[in-house]
Image (spheres, helix red, strand yellow):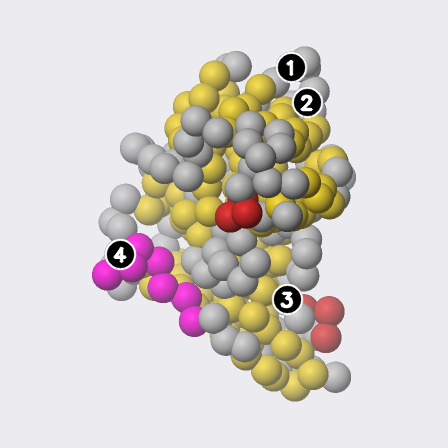
């Protein structure tokens, strides 16, 4: 079983749609959960960061973590063409390995 | 907003040559990282660095790789004898504490080995 599973997409939606992006993970030691956005040929840009189960909202973005199901989601409301990018989930352990573990990324295309 | 800067943005080198990729982390950050992304693949961890020494490295980070913080601002990744399979985007990242602190990434150096 892969440590992190993320659907690669591409996911194509019309402008204004609500987008749902998801990752599942198998490692119970993951305690910190992040979402990064990556535009083509650019570095990952931090969008959301959380360390507990539940929801966290920031503008049009909501991150949701369900530790019992080992499932995290990122929702984008009122999606814009400028949201077109690859979205990476990322995980950090509390102890042991200190490296950030990334999902493979979901490519999102928002059509105007 | 402070940012991580990387130079050069694109480096072309011949197989067997040495390359040095440079990074200036965010100024008050203490933890530094190199990651790599081969075209079309996931972002992979190479090495983390704290207090002037390597704190963790992956199996990718073999003897051909080394890192250094030569002064108070730069953080470098050296590949001694490049191979074709070293062609990738190399990202530098920094954070201000360990244990789950989010990483801030630079825009990367695209390394092409011919």
Residue ID for mark 3: A85
The residue lying at 26 percent from left, 56 percent from top is: A26
- Give the quarter of the figure containing the N terminus of chain B: top right
Q: Chain of mark 4?
A: A
Q: Which residues are magenta?
A: A1-7
Cα–Cα span, label 2 and label 3: 30 Å
Label 3 residue SS = strand
Q: Chain of mark 3?
A: A
| Nearer to me, A74 or A96 | A96
The residue lying at 68 percent from left, 13 percent from top is: B71
Do the residues at discs 3 and 1 belong to one chain?
no
- Residue B64 placement, left or right of B91: left
Residue ID for mark 2: B74
Cα–Cα span, label 2 and label 1: 6 Å
Cα–Cα span, label 2 and label 4: 36 Å
The residue lying at 35 percent from left, 40 percent from top is: A93
Residue ID for mark 4: A26
Q: Chain of mark 2?
A: B
N-terminal-most mark, 3 or 4: 4
C-beta proximity under 8 Å, tags 2 and 3? no
Indicate which label's residue lies in the foreground, 2 or 4: 2
C-beta proximity under 8 Å, tags 2 and 4? no
Q: Position of residue B82 (x, y in %)?
A: 56, 37
Q: Which mark is residue B70?
A: 1
C-beta proximity under 8 Å, tags 2 and 1? yes
Q: Position of residue B75 (x, y in %)?
A: 63, 25
């Amino acid at each position: 079983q892969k440590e992190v599973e993320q659907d690669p997409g591409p996911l194509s939606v019309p402008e204004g749609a609500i987008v749902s992006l998801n990752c599942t993970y198998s490692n119970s030691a993951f305690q910190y959960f992040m979402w990064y956005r990556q535009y083509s040929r650019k570095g990952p840009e931090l969008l959301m960061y959380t360390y507990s189960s539940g929801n966290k909202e920031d503008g049009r973005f909501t991150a949701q973590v369900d530790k019992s199901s080992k499932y995290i989601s990122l929702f984008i409301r009122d999606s814009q063409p400028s949201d077109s990018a690859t979205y990476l989930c990322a995980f950090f352990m509390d102890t042991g390995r200190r490296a950030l573990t990334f999902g493979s990324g979901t490519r999102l295309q928002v059509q105007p | 907003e402070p940012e991580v800067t990387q130079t050069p943005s694109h480096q072309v080198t011949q197989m067997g040559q040495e390359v040095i990729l440079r990074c200036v982390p965010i100024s008050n950050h203490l933890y530094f990282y190199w990651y790599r992304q081969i075209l079309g693949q996931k972002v992979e961890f190479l090495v983390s660095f704290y207090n002037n020494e390597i704190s963790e490295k992956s199996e990718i980070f073999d003897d051909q790789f080394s890192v250094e913080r030569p002064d108070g601002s730069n953080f470098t990744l050296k590949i001694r004898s490049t191979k074709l399979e070293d062609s990738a985007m190399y990202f530098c990242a920094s954070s201000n504490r360990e244990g789950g602190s989010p990483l801030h990434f630079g825009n990367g150096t695209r390394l092409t080995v011919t």
